[in-house]
Image (cartoon, rainbow, N blue to C red):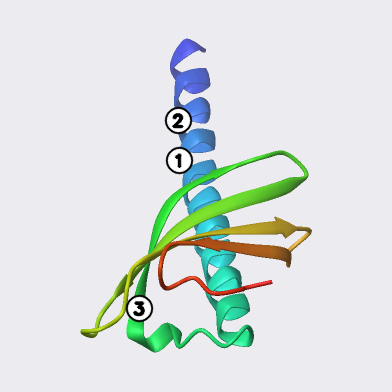
Amino acid sequence: MLKKTIVAAAVLIASVGPAAAASTSEQLALCVSALEQRGVSTGDYRARFKGVRGGGTKQLAIRMEPRVDGKEPMDVVCSIRRGEVVAVAGRGPGAVALN
């Protein structure tokens, strides 16, 4: 009986892990898309996930690292609620008025 419970718990934990990772990657894609809509040439940058926090409205922190010379890195925070970006804020020399 104990073995069955342990196996069931392991299966449950394994099934929850990838779903959370997919959610984060989807949120990252939403944030990058919002940057594109605000005029940031995202092809010149590589988005690096830094962290996420919040409850109903998630705040996703990413670092946009330049792939080309002459661009400055920027830190971006996207506020995402119900699968939609509701605000984008940027810091750094490359982050000009993103909202």
The x, y position of residue 76, in whole percent, is 51, 61
Left or right: where 34 falls relative to 7: right
The disc label shown at residue 10, or none = 2
The disc label shown at residue 14, or none = 1
Residue kind at label 2, given as amino acid type: Ala
The x, y position of residue 60, in whole percent, is 56, 53
Q: Residue at x 63, y 86 (%)?
A: 37
CA separation in Å, label 3 and label 1: 33 Å
The disc label shown at residue 45, or none = 3
Q: Residue at x 48, y 53 (%)?
A: 21
Of the pair 88 and 8, the residue shown nearer to us: 88
Residue kind at label 3, given as amino acid type: Tyr
Q: Earlier in the sequence, mark 2 or mark 3?
A: 2
Q: Nearer the viewer, mark 3 or mark 1?
A: 3
The x, y position of residue 64, in whole percent, is 39, 68
CA separation in Å, label 2 and label 1: 6 Å
Residue kind at label 1, given as amino acid type: Ala
Of the pair 96 and 58, the residue shown nearer to us: 96
Dot 2: element: helix
- Label 3: how many Cα within 10 Å (few below 14, some 14–19, many 20+): some
